Amino acid sequence: MKKILVSLFILGALASCKKKEDPKKTETIDSKFEKYKEHFITNLWDVYPDWASSQGYHKGDSILNVADSAYTKLQLDFAHVQLDSLRAYPLEQLSNNNKTDLHLIQNQLQSTIFNIDKLKSAEWDPSQYNVCGSFAEILNGNYDSVDVRLHHFNIKLKNVPAYYEAAKKNIKNPTIEHTDLAIAQNLGGISVFEKDLNNALSKSKLKAAEKNQIKERAKLAVAAVKEYAKWLKELDNTTPRSFRLGTDLYAKKFDLDIQSSLEVDSIFKIAMTHKAELHQKMFVIADRLWEKYNKKTVKPTDSLTLIRSVIDKISLQHTTPAKFQSEIEKQIPELVAYVKEKDLLYIDPSKPLVVRKEPSYMAGVAGASISAPGPYDKNANTYYNVGSMVGWDKETSESYLREYNDYILQILNIHEAIPGHYTQLVYSNRSPSIIKSILGNGAMIEGWAVYTELMMLESGYKNSDEMWLMYYKWNLRTTCNMILDYSVHTKEMSLEDAMHLLMVEAFQQQAEAEGKWKRVTLSQVQLSSYFTGYTEIYSFREMLKKEQKDAFNLKEFHEKFLSYGSAPVKYIKGLMLQDVKKK
């Protein structure tokens, strides 16, 4: 019996020691994973130097990868090797922060394999081949002297002709829509090698020999771009691929791009229900505003017609094409002041936001966007890109301005700038995890911007029936983005049905509706990210408010939510709930 007791004591002691060692073991695995992440990022930038540059990592600025079979193999080998390496880090033994990072890395690698092996967009999307943007970033950057940047620019120029020759070999049965976009964006970007380059050279102190070499190589680059556009125009493409993805490819791309806790079919059903709810709310307000805007006109019996009539009258309140950008610039400080006054979240005044005309190489997809600096270049400018109406006829400009009337323009600025994209991306760059900064989840990023629109109005911003009606119209756009994207790519929605959805059911102007149709033919899944992310964020906030009651603090929720970087909402939700339970 004594021996048995001694043995039990020893076993108990060993068990106790083992329990005490577990945290050290966890720390060791986390430490190893931290080192792995450093190597992963370094290797990632070796494979994707242009992506690295866009994040503020400029060691590969002089490299232009030629998209040939060897480069495709390099990408696939990298993805498979890294996925194999991740098996060395058991998920359950990692910290919460590293669990999320592992998921993000894994998802990125799986996306690479899917895009190359299954989606094969490199074959049917000629607009993927465009060097103008990466060269423009070198010229416009402030990360080094103009001479150093021009030196990198010069070396990078050498591969431009080979780059486009490889593109021609890759392209097979491209879609008509992506072919047209490729031609327009590449030709539009030629100014980078002429006007922008000459401007940079005029400020440079490089020797004449190198300046001349740059100019000669730039001419060859321009010739290669023009030849590529000419080749696309003359391409004998008798069996162009449809721009529609189809059910299987769309579902897989949705899972990888969105990383939602909900299936795409479920999100689609939620969007359809939400559309009906918005129509009901809009009818109540429009009915109340009817006499103000239609004094002697008889009310229509159809609710959508009534809503449309009131919206059309309010939409006449808008700026001019010449003042469109300046009006945006004027509103930014007003939004900053309001967020501070209401104490909704902290906005870092040291991070510059510059409103600029949308660069020509970006034109053709969205009318307004944010270009944010990466985590390596945190103090660089964030650009608010505003589409230009130069060259538009009067009718098209008027249609566009009615869509972005005085009320909706403010909601657009909330979405794109304060406290939407600009603010969220500043927080993302402050995240302790660089993985979450560089592998940002689009649904979280877009979802946050959409969420802030409602949050601002809930807090009392410009409170009026007109503002709420226009907000609901804007939110209906987000909702119909999801319905449109899913229906077009998986249900063969026609142009006619899409126009009915956008113009009749979503009350959009013709110019906006036509632009959205163009966008859905050029992109896949991205239009679904807005509603999906917004739905998950808002639902999570409302759940916490219900649980915490008086203890819930809106500013704390916002800053805590954003502190995790641009991670998928489902992971942020899990981490925040764990933190709540610890309190």
Image (cartoon, grey):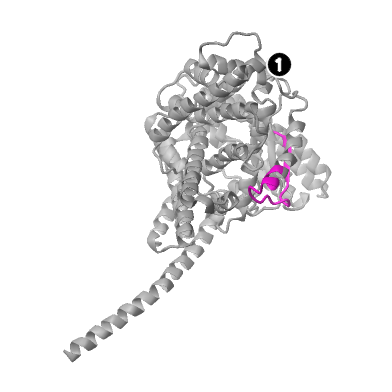
**Quadrant the N terminus occupies:** bottom left
Judged from this view, the residue extending furthest toward the bottom is 2
Rendering coords of residue 55 (x, y %): 62, 49
Q: Nearer the viewer, residue 171 or 287?
A: 287
Span colored in magenta: 338-358
Is 354 one of the magenta-colored residues?
Answer: yes
Q: Position of residue 234 (x, y in %)?
A: 57, 21
Residue 93 in picture, x, y percent from top left: 40, 64
Name which residue lies at 63% across and 53% down.
57
- Residue at image point 65% right, 41% down: 371
**Circle 1 Cα neighbour tier, 10 Å, few/some/many (<14 / 14–19 / ≥20):** few
For the question of whether residue 158 can be seen, the reply is no
The picture places residue 206, in percent across and down from the top left corner, at 81, 49
Under mark 1, the amino acid is Asp
In the picture, residue 457 is in which quadrant? top right
Q: Residue furthest left?
A: 1
> Disc 1 on helix, strand or loop?
loop
Find out whether residue 60 is within the magenta segment: no
Say which of 54 and 345 sits in front: 345
**Measured along the vertical axis of the image, is residue 508 above or below residue 261?**
above
Q: Name which quarter of the figure residue 231 lies in.
A: top right
> Is 76 in front, or is 253?
253
Q: According to the image, label 1 marks what residue?
A: 393
Give me the residue at 39% from left, 59% from top: 91
The answer to whether residue 312 of the structure is visible from this angle is: yes
